[in-house]
Image (tube, helix red, strand yellow):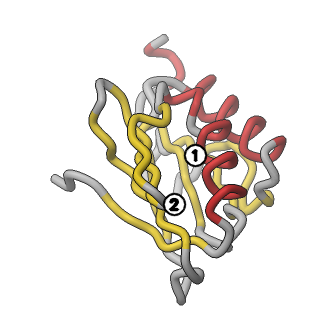
Amino acid sequence: MLDHIGLIVHDYQRSKAFYQFALAPLGYELVMEMGDWAGFGWGGKPQLLIKGGSSTAPPVHIAFSAEDRDTVQSFFDMALQAGGKDNGAPGLRPEYHDNYFAAYVLDPDGHNIEVVCHIPADAF
């Protein structure tokens, strides 16, 4: 439904590095950069845009889809390595539905970044 989303970030270079590393397991890459704007996506089309300035307040929650549970785990590991803070380790969230497998990380500005897979484990 959404085409793209944009965030204002406090430290542009730090956030750009965070998202480049943390979103790599999803196949996202830096696809555009104009001044203090960076766009992450694939196929040349940005889906997440960040802009240097001051942090978006209050922080927002963004959820990205993953094709499998290993990708959720990879995102979590890489996001922590990139300076994110654990806000919910990879695991099932049955309160949402039986196959809701997600991980949550706070980015450098405190935004809650989620990666979720809805596919049952036995489907792989």
Amino acid type indicated by mark 2: Glu
On residue 95, the disc is 2
In this view, 13 is above or below 42: below
- Quarter of the figure with residue 21: top right
Q: Earlier in the sequence, mark 2 or mark 1?
A: 2
Q: Residue at x 59, y 66 (%)?
A: 112
Seen from the viewer's position, the closer of residues 49 and 1 is 49
Seen from the viewer's position, the closer of residues 36 and 122 is 36
Q: Left or right? Give the position of 47 relative to 39.
A: left
Q: Left or right? Give the position of 28 relative to 21.
A: left
The crowd level at tag 2 (other Cα within 10 Å; few <14, some 14-19, many 20+) is few
User: Contact (CB < 8 A) between labels 2 and 1?
Assistant: no
- Quarter of the figure with residue 104: bottom right
User: Residues under labels 2 and 1: Cα distance?
Assistant: 12 Å
The residue pinned by badge 1 equals: 102
> Residue 31: image x %, image y %?
40, 35
> Residue 122: image x %, image y %?
50, 16
